[in-house]
C-alpha cells in the first residue's frame, strides 16, 4: 500500500465524524433551530459509547448507547429552547460545558482501557482493486453508515413531503403554524436527530478512530462541524465536500508533523482552526445575503 | 390538559432577583442528586462545595483571587451579549493578553526596574486581548463572518501559540526542560493587598471595572446605544447608531478586559508563564454573565458564586475524592437553570383544559 493510498484512507476516517455530526446539525438548522452544543453531545457520545462497549464487549451496543446519550442531551436542549423558548445560543453553550464535564465523569474509570478498533467490513475480491479497493470496499460500518446518512438526509430534505414541511418550518415558523403544522413537534424531532448524529460521531471517535477514551478527545470537532454547515450553505452534498476538505487538512497536518519539516508542530495543529476561519471568510465574503434558514435561532411561542 | 407559554404583559421587579436565586437553589438540588448517585453523602458534599470555602479569612481571599478574572471577563461579555454580539472566545483573548504582557516581564527580566513594569504589562495585556478580539469583530463587520465560530476557533490558536512559546523560545533555560518561563521579577508581579495570602490589587481593578461598566450602561449615551442595538436594531439604525461600530467597540472592550484578566493571572497567582494558565475562566465567565442577568453589578455577584464552585471543586477533590469534572457539570447545570428560570420573566405558564384546539 503506497503512501498516497494510506493518506486517502486516513482522510476518510478523519472526515467521517465531521460528516455525521454536520449532517445532523444541518437538519436541526433547516428546522430553524441553532444548536451550538454539538461539541458537548459528541463528547458525551464518545465517552458513553466507549464505556458501554468496554462493559458489554459489544461495539454495536456501544454505538447505540452513544446515539441514545446524544439524544438525551439534545432532549435537554429542546426542553429549554422549545419548551421554555430560552435563548438558543446560550443554551447550546451550556450544553457544551455540561457535556465536557459529564463526559469526564462517565469516562473517568475507562482512561487507559483499550479495545480493538471496530472490525472493518471487507468485500471479497472488490477490496483488492488497486487504490480504490481498500478505500471503498474495506471500511468500518460507521463509514458506510455516514454515506447512507448523507443520501438519506438529501432524499428526506429535498424529495420527501416531511422534509418539505421541515424546511418550511425553518423558513417561516409562523406560516407553517398557520397551515396547521406543529412547529414545536417537528423541531423537537429534528433536534433529537441532530443529537443522535452527534452521539454517533462521538462513538466513531472513541470506537474506531482512536480506540480509547481520553478527556477532551473531540478537540473542537463539534465546532468545526457547525462551521461546515455554514460553509455548505445548508446543503447536504456540500456538507460532504466540507467534511472531506477538513478531514484532508487534518490529515495533511498530521503527515507534515510526522515528516518533521521544521515547522513548529503547534502551527500545524492550529491549521484546521485557521482553515475554518479562512473558509468562513471566503464563503461569507463571496455570498450576497444570507442563505441561512430565515427563522434560524428565533424561538417560537404559538399564540392561541 | 395542556400547558402553554403565554407572554407576560408586566415584568415584576422581584422576579428578576428571584430567578437567578431559584437557579442557584435548583443547581444545588441537582448537585445533591448527582452526589447521591455517585455514592457520596449529599449534605456533606454540598457543605464542602459551598460552605467550607467561606469559613476563614484565607479561604475568602482565595475566593476573591478566583473571582477576579471572572469579574473582568464577564463584565466585558455583558456588553457584548447586550448588543447581540456573541463573543465566546474570551478564553483565547485571556491567553493572548497573558502572552503580550509576559513579553515585557521576560524582556526586562534580570535588569533593575521600577514599578512601571507591572503597569506597562497590564496595558500590554489589555492590548493583546483587544487585538485578538478585534479579529472576529472585523471579520463580522467586514465580511459577515459568524463571530461565534471565529472567536471560538481563535481560542485554540491562542492556546497553541502559548504552548509553542513556553516550550520553545520563552522556556526557562535553567528549568530542567519543564515547559515554563522563568519566575517573574518582583517588579513584574501584582502587588499584594495583605501581608499573608494571595489577594492582590487585581481584585480592586476588577471591582472598579464593574462599577464603571454599570455606570456607563445605565447612565451614559454609549450604554444606551449598546442596549438599543441589541434590543431594537431597526430603531438603533433610525437613531443614527452604527451597529458595526458598536460591534467593534464591545469586542474591543471585552477583549481588553479578558486580556487584562490573563496578564493579572500570570503576574499574580501564577507568577510565570505555563502551557495552561486558566481552568476555563473565559468559558465560565459566559455563565457568570447570564447568572448576573447581563448586568455588570449582577456579574460581580455572580462571579463570586462561580469562584465558589472552583474552590469547592478543588476542596471536594481533596477531601472526598470527588473528580474535578463535577465542577464543570455544576456550571453547565447552573447555566441551564438560569436560562430556564429566565423564561418565566417573559412568559407565564397557563394550564388549559383539553378539548380546545390550539
Image (cartoon, coloured by chain):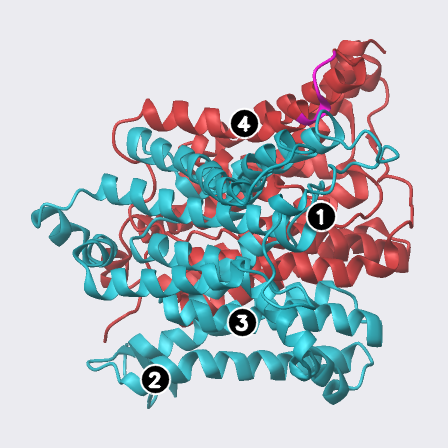
Chain colours: A red, B cyan
Q: Quadrant of the N terminus of chain B?
A: bottom left
- Label 4 and label 3: CA atoms lie apart by 35 Å
Give the secondary structure at mark 2: helix
4 or 1: tag closer to the N-terminus = 1
Q: CA distance from mark 4 to mark 1?
A: 20 Å
Q: Which residue is mark 1?
A: A216
Residue linked to disc 2: B15
Whether discs 2 and 4 lie on one chain: the answer is no
- Tell me whether marks 1 and 3 sit on the same chain: no
* Residue for badge 4: A274
* Labels 4 and 1 positioned on one and the same chain: yes
- Count up the numbered dots: 4
Chain part drawn in magenta? A262-266
Q: Chain of mark 4?
A: A
| Circle 2 crowding by C-alpha within 10 Å: few under 14, some 14–19, many from 20 | some
Q: Which residue is mark 3?
A: B304
Using the numbered discs, state the Cα–Cα distance from disc 1 to disc 3 in whole angstroms: 27 Å
Determine which quarter of the picture holds residue A74.
bottom right
Q: CA distance from mark 3 to mark 2?
A: 21 Å
Give percent across and percent down for residue A280.
Answer: 43, 29
Is residue A189 visible to us here? Answer: no
Amino acid at each position: 500500500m503506497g503512501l498516497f493510498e494510506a493518506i486517502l484512507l486516513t482522510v476518510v476516517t478523519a472526515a467521517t465524524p465531521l460528516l455525521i455530526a454536520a449532517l445532523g446539525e444541518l437538519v436541526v438548522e433547516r428546522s430553524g433551530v441553532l444548536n451550538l452544543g454539538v461539541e458537548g453531545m459528541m463528547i458525551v457520545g464518545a465517552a458513553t459509547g466507549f464505556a458501554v462497549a468496554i462493559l458489554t464487549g459489544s461495539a454495536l451496543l456501544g454505538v447505540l448507547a452513544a446515539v441514545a446519550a446524544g439524544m438525551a442531551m439534545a432532549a435537554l436542549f429542546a426542553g429549554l429552547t422549545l419548551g421554555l423558548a430560552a435563548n438558543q445560543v446560550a443554551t447550546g453553550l451550556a450544553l457544551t460545558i455540561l457535556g465536557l464535564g459529564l463526559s469526564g465523569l462517565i469516562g473517568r474509570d475507562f482512561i487507559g482501557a483499550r479495545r480493538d478498533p471496530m472490525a472493518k467490513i471487507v468485500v471479497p475480491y472488490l477490496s483488492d482493486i488497486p487504490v480504490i479497493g481498500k478505500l471503498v470496499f474495506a471500511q468500518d460500518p460507521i463509514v458506510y453508515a455516514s454515506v447512507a446518512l448523507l443520501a438519506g438526509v438529501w432524499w428526506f430534505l429535498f424529495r420527501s413531503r416531511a422534509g418539505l414541511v421541515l424546511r418550511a418550518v425553518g423558513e417561516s415558523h409562523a406560516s407553517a403554524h398557520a397551515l396547521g403544522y406543529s412547529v414545536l413537534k417537528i423541531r423537537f424531532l429534528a433536534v433529537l436527530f441532530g443529537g443522535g448524529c452527534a452521539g454517533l460521531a462521538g462513538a466513531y471517535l472513541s470506537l474506531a478512530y482512536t480506540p480509547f477514551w481520553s478527556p477532551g478527545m473531540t478537540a473542537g470537532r463539534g465546532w468545526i462541524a457547525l462551521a461546515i454547515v455554514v460553509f455548505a450553505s445548508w446543503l447536504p452534498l456540500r456538507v460532504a465536500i466540507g467534511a472531506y476538505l477538513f478531514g484532508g487538512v487534518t490529515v495533511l497536518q498530521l503527515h507534515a508533523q510526522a515528516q518533521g519539516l521544521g515547522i513548529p508542530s503547534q502551527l500545524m495543529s492550529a491549521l484546521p482552526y485557521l482553515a475554518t476561519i479562512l473558509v468562513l471568510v471566503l464563503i461569507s465574503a463571496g455570498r450576497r445575503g444570507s442563505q441561512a434558514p430565515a427563522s434560524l435561532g428565533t424561538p417560537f411561542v404559538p399564540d392561541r | 390538559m395542556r400547558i402553554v407559554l403565554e407572554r407576560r404583559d408586566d415584568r415584576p421587579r422581584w422576579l428578576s432577583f428571584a430567578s437567578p436565586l431559584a437557579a442557584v437553589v435548583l443547581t444545588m438540588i441537582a448537585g445533591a442528586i448527582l452526589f447521591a448517585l455517585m455514592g457520596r453523602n449529599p449534605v456533606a458534599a454540598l457543605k464542602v462545595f459551598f460552605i467550607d470555602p467561606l469559613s476563614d479569612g484565607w479561604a475568602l481571599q482565595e475566593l476573591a483571587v478566583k473571582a477576579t478574572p471572572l469579574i473582568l471577563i464577564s463584565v466585558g461579555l455583558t456588553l457584548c451579549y447586550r448588543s447581540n454580539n456573541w463573543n465566546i472566545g474570551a478564553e483565547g483573548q485571556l491567553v493572548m493578553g497573558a502572552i503580550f504582557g509576559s513579553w515585557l516581564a521576560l524582556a526586562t527580566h534580570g535588569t533593575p526596574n521600577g514599578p512601571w513594569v507591572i503597569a506597562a504589562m497590564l496595558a500590554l495585556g489589555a492590548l493583546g486581548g483587544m487585538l485578538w478580539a478585534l479579529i472576529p469583530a472585523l471579520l463580522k463587520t467586514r465580511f459577515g463572518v459568524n463571530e461565534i465560530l471565529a472567536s471560538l476557533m481563535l481560542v485554540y490558536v491562542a492556546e497553541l501559540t502559548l504552548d509553542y512559546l513556553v516550550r520553545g523560545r520563552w522556556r526557562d533555560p535553567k528549568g530542567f526542560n519543564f515547559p515554563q518561563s522563568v519566575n517573574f521579577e518582583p517588579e513584574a508581579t501584582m502587588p499584594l493587598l495583605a501581608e499573608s495570602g494571595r489577594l492582590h490589587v487585581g481584585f480592586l481593578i476588577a471591582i472598579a471595572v464593574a462599577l464603571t461598566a454599570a455606570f456607563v450602561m445605565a447612565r451614559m449615551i454609549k450604554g444606551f446605544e449598546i442596549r438599543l442595538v441589541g434590543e431594537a436594531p431597526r430603531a438603533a439604525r433610525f437613531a443614527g447608531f452604527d451597529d458595526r461600530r458598536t460591534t467593534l467597540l464591545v469586542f474591543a472592550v471585552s477583549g481588553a478586559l479578558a486580556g487584562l484578566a490573563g496578564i493579572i493571572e500570570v503576574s499574580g497567582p501564577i507568577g510565570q508563564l505555563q502551557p495552561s494558565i486558566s481552568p476555563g475562566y473565559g468559558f465560565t465567565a459566559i455563565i457568570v454573565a447570564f447568572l448576573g442577568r447581563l448586568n455588570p453589578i449582577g456579574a460581580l455577584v455572580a462571579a463570586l458564586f462561580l469562584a465558589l464552585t472552583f474552590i469547592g471543586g478543588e476542596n471536594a477533590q481533596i477531601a472526598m475524592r470527588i473528580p474535578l469534572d463535577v465542577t464543570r457539570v455544576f456550571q453547565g447545570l447552573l447555566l441551564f437553570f438560569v436560562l430556564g428560570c429566565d423564561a418565566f420573566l417573559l412568559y407565564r405558564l397557563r394550564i388549559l383544559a383539553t378539548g380546545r384546539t390550539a
